[in-house]
Image: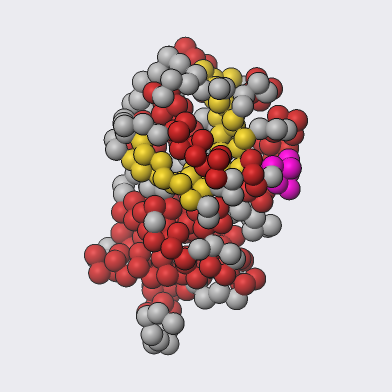
Amino acid sequence: MKIGIIGAGGWGTALSCVLADNGFQPLIWCFESTTTDEINLNRTNSVFLPGVTLPLAIRATSALTDLHSCDILVISTPTQHIRATVSAYPELFKGKKIVDVAKGIEIGTTYRISQILEEAVGIKPENYAVLTGPSHAEEVSRRHPTTVVTASDNGMLAAEVQKIFSNKNFRVYSSVDVIGCELGGALKNVIAVAAGVVDGAGFGDNTKAALITRGLAEITRLGVAVGATQNTFFGLSGIGDLFVTCASKLSRNRQVGEYLGRGQKIDDIISSMKMVAEGVHTTRSAYELAQTHRIEMPITEQIYKLLFGGYSVKDSMEELMARETKREWL
């Protein structure tokens, strides 16, 4: 079986290590030709996954056409670039099984990634799976024990993804809730930005615990409103991914929030980062999605105002804490 990975960021590269450990010879498509050369010649990806020596089985290319013979394509491109990337060569995706590992919601359309792929290149639900959960690329590439979940409308495809990726260090569970797994992976990045704000502003553990708990509540509200199963958000793609992204120093989204909490401007923060923090774009999309479905998401709303509405941390915290009191669960 031939497996191609579209996107040579940290996560795509780390998953190529998993696949190589499992006996495959993954072919990674790199947007930057310098990354292609570095992987092929030096067995490293110093920009996106520093300090890791890549297995010899991994190969890289700068030509999407080289992935044409692959049976399975793994989408690891940042969400906002997926449509343009796949639309550049739509013939590549005909008859292919797709595994999405990106986490985000498209700006403008508020589409999940499965919806982007179906509209852009005709990927049907029976050929699509999402792989998500608490999994920092740095730790996966170093073979730290990790568990994730794959979801597909096609149970046979979910079982195949489990078999392909699972090993003694990387355990894959399965689900049928594609919507819930996609939204859990995307929306946790918004709450992770908020968690970083908590850290940057110097608030304590009480604040962080409240943020994670109430963040999960609003993620669940929106998810259920658009067709997800509530229990999904109490699993790996929900509270699992939310916890690791809000708590870890490895989280880019939490880091963005930490800089915001210290008073830095978002444009300056983004321009200084080499890798994409999906939570910034997803905040805009999540806010619009909540408005469309009339779902109350106060933390998301305040992060939106902090990023795009000129609010200060003080303004946002005061609005959150001064909201009308209510029952915890309705």
- Residue beneath the point at 61% across and 53% down: 112
Q: Is residue 64 above or below residue 303?
A: above
Hey, which quadrant is residue 308 in on the image? Answer: bottom right
Direction from residue 66 to residue 170 in the image, left or right: left
Number of numbered tags placed on the structure image: 0
- Identify the magenta region: 117-123
Nearest the eye: 230 or 213: 230
Horizontal and vertical percent position of residue 93? 69, 33
Hey, which quadrant is residue 117 in on the image? Answer: top right
Nearest the eye: 254 or 243: 243
Name the main secondary structure of what is drawn in magenta: helix
Question: Magenta stretch: residue 120 in it?
Answer: yes
Direction from residue 94 to residue 56 in the image, left or right: left
Quadrant in which the C terminus is drawn: bottom left
The structure's colour scheme is secondary structure
Quadrant in which the N terminus is drawn: top right
Nearest the eye: 152 or 310: 152
- Residue beneath the point at 41% across and 65% down: 216
Direction from residue 290 to residue 297 in the image, left or right: left
Residue 271 in view in this figure: no
Horizontal and vertical percent position of residue 30? 57, 26
